[in-house]
Amino acid sequence: MYERVRDVTALAGRVAVAVVFLAHGLDKWNAGLGATTDMVEAMGIPLPTLSAIFLIAVEVIGSIAFILGIALPLVGIGYAVAGLGALFFVHLDAGLTGAGGYELVLVLALAGLALGFNGGRLSLDHLLFGRRKAAAREQSVAEAVRA
C-alpha cells in the first residue's frame, strides 16, 4: 500500500511542477525565439539565444516528458538549471519572500530536481528501464546468497 501511495504522490508532484514550468515555457514559445532572446539578454544571462532555446526546450518539451515520466533525471537537472538561473539573474535582489522573491523559483527548481531522481513507478522511465534494473538487482542478490 505504501509503495502505491508513494508512486501516486510522486506522479502528482511531477504533474504539478511540470504544469508550472510548462505555463512559463508556453509564454516563451508564444512570444517567439526573438522576444525570448531579447528578454534573456536584458536580464544579463550569457549566450542569450542559446539560453532562450534551452529555456523553451526544458519548459515545454521537458515538461511534457516530466508528466509522462520519461528522461526524468535529465529534465530534473534542466529544471534546476533554469530555476537557479532565474533565481540568480532575476529574483535574488528581491530576497526570499515578498514581491519578486525567489521562494517559488527555489522550490520549483529543487522539487523538479528531486522528482527527477525519485519520480516513482508511474513513469515511462520505470516501465522501460526500472523493471530491468529490478530484475538485475534480484539476480545479483540471488547470486550473492548462493556464493
Image (cartoon, helix red, strand yellow):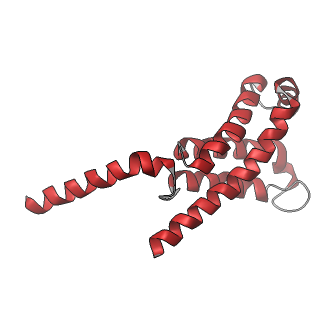
Q: Position of residue 57 (x, y in %)?
A: 69, 33
Figure quadrant of residue 99: bottom right
| Residue at image point 32% right, 55% down | 134
Figure quadrant of residue 22: top right
Check the image and report above or below for 84 versus 14: above
Is residue 87 shown left or right of residue 77? right
Is residue 51 shown left or right of residue 118? right
Q: Position of residue 111 (x, y in %)?
A: 64, 57
| Residue at image point 67% right, 44% down | 63
Q: Residue furthest right?
A: 99
Q: Residue furthest bottom?
A: 1
Q: Quadrant of the N terminus?
A: bottom left
Along the line of sight, the residue nearer the viewer: 17 or 123: 123
Check the image and report above or below for 123 versus 54: below
Q: Quadrant of the C terminus?
A: bottom left
Is residue 29 shown left or right of residue 79? right
Is residue 142 shown left or right of residue 93? left
| Residue at image point 69% right, 31% down | 54
Figure quadrant of residue 97: bottom right
Q: Position of residue 125 (x, y in %)?
A: 47, 47
Q: How many marks?
A: 0
Check the image and report above or below for 29 versus 23: above
Along the line of sight, the residue nearer the viewer: 71 or 131: 131
| Residue at image point 13% right, 63% down | 145
